[in-house]
Amino acid sequence: MEQSLDFIYGHFSDIEKDDMEYIYRGEITPVIVMDILDFAKSNLAKAEDTKKLKTRIYYIMGEGLQNITRHQADNVDENVDKEAIIVIVKKRHKYIIATGNLMFKAEEDALRTKLEKINHMDSDGLREFSKEIRNNMQLSAKGGASLGLIEMAKRSGNKLDYLIKSVDEQLSYFYLTTEIKISDEEEPENAPEVYSVKQLIENHENFNKNNYIISFKGDFNQENLLSLLAILKSGMSETPTRIKLYSVMVELLQNIVKHADNIDHAEDWKAGVFFIKELEDSFSLLAGNYVRREHSASLKERIDRLNNMSYKDLTKEYNKILLNTEINDSVSTGLGFIDIRRKTGNPIEYSLKKVDDEIDFFIVKTIVNKKN
Amino acid sequence: MESFIKEPTIDTPRVVLDADSGIFEISQMSLPEDAVDFYAPIINWLMEYSENPNKETVFNMKLEYFNTASSKQLIQILLLLGNLKGKTDITVNWYYKEIDEDMQALGEEYSQIINLPFNLISVPKQAN
């Protein structure tokens, strides 16, 4: 079994109800920023947070993401992983917005000074500082950059946790996490940090190494599925490859929305994990969710059977199901995997990992070849 | 007969079924969470229409994308239209984007399942 499939479960297994984690790695454009904010919003809507809180979280995210578009260094050496990373995490009673991007070393000192200054201020100090800058509006070409950071600190009520990591003689990565507490509930004693700069760097390195471009773990529903699709659409121009990616993604994600079982039998939580990986000549899409043991055998049998079919046989099978009027179920048509096999032309890789006596974790991987 | 018009959403198509003006069209995106539920009123409308159809019926399928759950419902629509043969002069126009080989292939397959005048119409990529 490919190492990446096991990695998926490892990445997933610590999730608890209502947690979520979204990671994007790639070029950050204003359009992508808007899409990611929409996506975050569709997840915020589900959580039981107050409107005021939602607005605050949304605002801080906006500042954090726009901060990258202002600061990121471009025109850099081909050998450097220049893609930025954005992470949005909800765990227990906290949201974290984390970003990492390339910057020029020449700007490092000024940034560090600014961050230290902000982190040593209390809320009154931040308000004053913000006013002062607004009044002097002598903003640099990077426009309003300090204001963004001040607002993030002010509105989150927390220090800006950061790390500047050297890449080469000219460039560094700037990593920043901001934590937003969403309830007054105390953290359990010795609870690990929800999401640290160290984890951010690990994720960035892992994503760079394995060429992952998007991941999401959490509750899958139609609304956040549509937002994930929108991010894919904005990130790529319309090509035959994107058309295929889009349709495979819909089938994989709607599979989770419709079929995911749950480890604690909670009906209203379709927990799953999803990754897109981009290689030179292909994309891989990986999806994982819990399935009850009694479904595992038939799932395995079905995929094995489809993997051994020729295109012609797949089409026959597809038409048979399509025309079978006895199957008119809004939950399951049985066409999804056939469609994926036909459209990609590649076998469907999968793994079923035993979680406990009743539940397996099902991971599926499909490859979409790039076309010219 | 009263027309059936549904404006599109991000995951459901635009639907125009208007016997008076002779427009029958499904366009844009179809990936609803519950395809059976979404297409039921459309299928009902067409069943009613088939009792007393126009002399001529041109049905335009202009979907940019549909998921497998929708395909089961679309084939029901096509089968219904197939039953109209003899009662009305029926044609199906299946539009697909030039670059979308999957939509083209589906159109070719469906045209073989449904015994109807079936035009596959390639839409060139729009200049940006």
Image (cartoon, coloured by chain):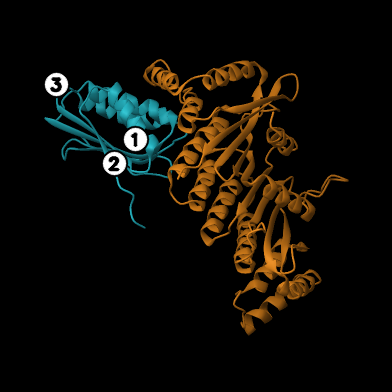
Chain colours: A orange, B cyan
Left or right of A87, for residue B12: left
Tags 2 and 1 on a common chain: yes
Few, some or many residues within 10 Å of mark 2 (<14, 14–19, 20+)? some
Parent chain of label 3 = B
Viewer-proximal residue among B95 and A197: B95
Q: Amino acid at mark 2?
A: Ser
A64 to A110, vertically: above or below = above
Is any atom of residue A89 visible in this view? Answer: no
Residue type of the residue flagged with mark 3: Gly
A51 horizontally vs B84: left or right: right
Image x and y of residue A34, in percent: 53, 57
Quadrant of res B15: top left
Circle number at residue B122: 2
Q: Measured from the top left, where is residue A205 in percent x and y?
A: 72, 51
**Marks 2 and 3: same chain?**
yes
Q: Is residue B124 left or right of residue A208?
A: left
Q: Which chain is disc 2 placed on?
A: B
C-alpha separation, residue under disc 2 versus residue under disc 3: 28 Å
Label 2 or label 1, whichever comes before in sequence order: 1
Mark 3 or mark 1, which is nearer the start of the sequence? 3
Q: Looking at the rendered structure, which numbered label has been put on residue B86?
A: 3
Q: Secondary structure at mark 3?
A: loop
Residue depicted at 67% across the width and 18% down the height: A293
Q: Label 1: state its secondary structure.
A: helix
Query: Would residue B127 appear left or right of A241 to someone viewing this image?
Result: left
